[in-house]
Image (cartoon, helix red, strand yellow):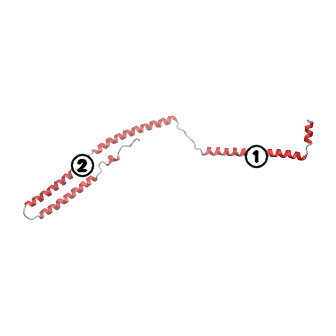
């Protein structure tokens, strides 16, 4: 042991400086690695903190609440099906309602009225050819018959424009798909 101490004392200054420099470079490398590890650790910690603050809180529904909602949805679906069936019944009632029936009856009445007026007009022409004398009464009669026919055609067009079954077209059942 005394020999090793003597060897240490026998080192020259340049040897001691060389040993110190090698220890310093080793320590410097260790400090750089530790600084890099500390930097990586800090960046990971910051990333974790940021992710925790930006992540939304997830609230899960409890099973009993979910089952209650499922039951409500099933009930609403059943009610919807019942309403759709009722809408079909209401549509048939509306199609056979008095408004639709009156419209059809009025249309057929106007058409028969026009046939009747045309027949009367033709009959008067035929009658006028059979009788001697002036035909001015026939022109007046024809004008009045034309006015009546024109009014009847206008009423027919107005009746055709009426949309008595409009509600039945609007109330078609919803597709459950």
Kind of element beneath mark 1: helix
Q: Residue at x 41, y 38 (%)?
A: 77
Q: Position of residue 138 (x, y in %)?
A: 13, 62
Badge 1 density bin: few <14, some 14–19, many ≥20, Cα 10 Å:
few
Q: Residue 104, labelled with which disc?
A: 2
Element class at badge 2: helix
Where residue 146 sits: x, y (%)? 18, 60
Residue placed under numbered mark 1 in the picture? 32
Q: Which residue sits at x=9%, y=61%?
A: 129
Separation of residues labelled 1 and 2 (CA atoms): 100 Å
Camera-near label (1 vs 2) is 1
Which residue lies at the image location 30% right of the left edge and 42% below the top edge? 92
Against 114, residue 54 (above or below) is above
Q: Are marks 1 and 2 in contact (CB under 8 Å)?
A: no
Rendered image quadrant of residue 87: top left
The x, y position of residue 149, in whole percent, is 19, 57
């Amino acid at each position: 042991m005394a020999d090793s101490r003597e060897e240490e004392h026998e080192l020259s200054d340049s040897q001691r400086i060389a040993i110190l420099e090698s220890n310093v470079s080793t320590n410097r490398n260790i400090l750089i690695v530790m600084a890099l590890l500390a930097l990586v650790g800090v960046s990971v910690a910051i990333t974790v903190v940021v992710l925790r603050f930006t992540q939304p809180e997830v609230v899960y529904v409890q099973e009993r609440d979910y089952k209650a909602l499922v039951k409500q949805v099933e009930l609403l679906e059943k009610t919807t099906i019942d309403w759709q069936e009722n809408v079909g019944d209401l549509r048939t009632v509306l199609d056979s309602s008095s408004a639709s029936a009156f419209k059809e009856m009025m249309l057929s009445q106007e058409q028969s009225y026009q046939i009747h007026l045309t027949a009367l007009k033709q009959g008067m022409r035929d009658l006028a050819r059979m009788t001697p004398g002036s035909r001015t009464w026939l022109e007046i009669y024809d004008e009045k018959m034309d006015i009546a026919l024109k009014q009847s055609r206008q009423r027919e067009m107005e009746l055709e424009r009426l949309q008595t079954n409009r509600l039945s077209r609007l109330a078609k059942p919803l597709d459950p798909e």
